[in-house]
Image: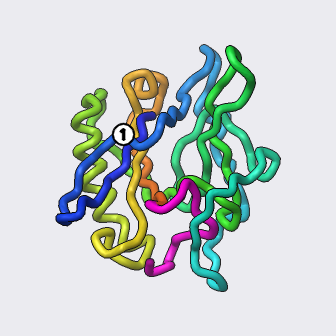
Amino acid sequence: MRPHLLHRRPEGQICVTTHRVVILVAALAAGVVLAACAGTRVADNAPTTTAAPTTTTTEAPLSAGRQISFYVPAVGDCFDQRTVGTPPSTSMITLLLPCRLPHQSEVFAALDYPGPTFPGTSLLEQYAKRRCVLRFAAYVGRPYETSRYDIAYDLPDQKGWDNGIRHVIGCLVASPDTDRLAGTVRGSGR
């Protein structure tokens, strides 16, 4: 997957830039099966109504979430992308976290691309840029253009597409101020 961030420029224009070196691993070995992660979610990602979401630079410990090497974005998930291990044996994992803990991203929409073949990164970027912005207000409770949050998105690359991630695009909320959010942004109106 290839993450990107939509930034608001001072003059109000929106542009797309690479956000972080975050790679969602589609398959680590020949035997990886999509069903291995199906139906597993962190239970504590329900919206909170007692506190507004904040931002933080504090990182939740790995033991606070569930580490997975293959992740398909699901609405309401909160997660970090982390590098684990020691060089030269490192790998990128997704750490699913309860939304109440500090996290880098929260999934506000998961989109399907309408074509059967890999359309290329450029077309997926254009599709995500248009569609994610349209879904933002329904989840956050405020239009993207007036929100304090930024939008990022994860796209399948050719390798991921070939390994079964054929239509999933994750639309993500990200903090413009720090690395992490604390608390869900669902219905926050911010």
- Where residue 33 appears, x then y in whole percent? 61, 27
Q: Residue at x 44, y 73 (%)?
A: 140
In the figure, 190 relative to 161: above or below?
below
Q: Left or right of 91: which side holds 175?
A: left
- Where residue 38 appears, x then y in whole percent? 63, 43
Q: What is the quadrant of residue 19 in the picture?
A: top left
- Where residue 60 appears, x then y in whole percent? 73, 53
So how many labels did they put on this image? Answer: 1
Residue 168 appears in the rendering: no
Q: Residue at x 44, y 77 (%)?
A: 190
Amino acid type for the residue under numbered disc 1: Thr
- Main structural element of the magenta stretch: helix, strand or loop? loop
Q: Left or right of 75: which side holds 182?
A: right
Quick one: SS at disc 1?
A: strand
Q: Any magenta on residue 126?
A: no
Q: Residue furthest right?
A: 63
Q: Magenta stretch: give its range.
A: 176-190
Q: Residues within 10 Å of mark 1 (few under 14, many from 20)?
A: few
In the figure, 53 relative to 159: above or below?
below
Q: Residue furthest bottom?
A: 50
Where the N terminus falls, by quadrant? top left
The residue that disc 1 covers is 18
Q: Nearer the viewer, residue 84 or 77?
A: 84
Residue 45 appears in the rendering: yes
Q: Any magenta on residue 178?
A: yes
Q: Residue at x 44, y 49 (%)?
A: 170
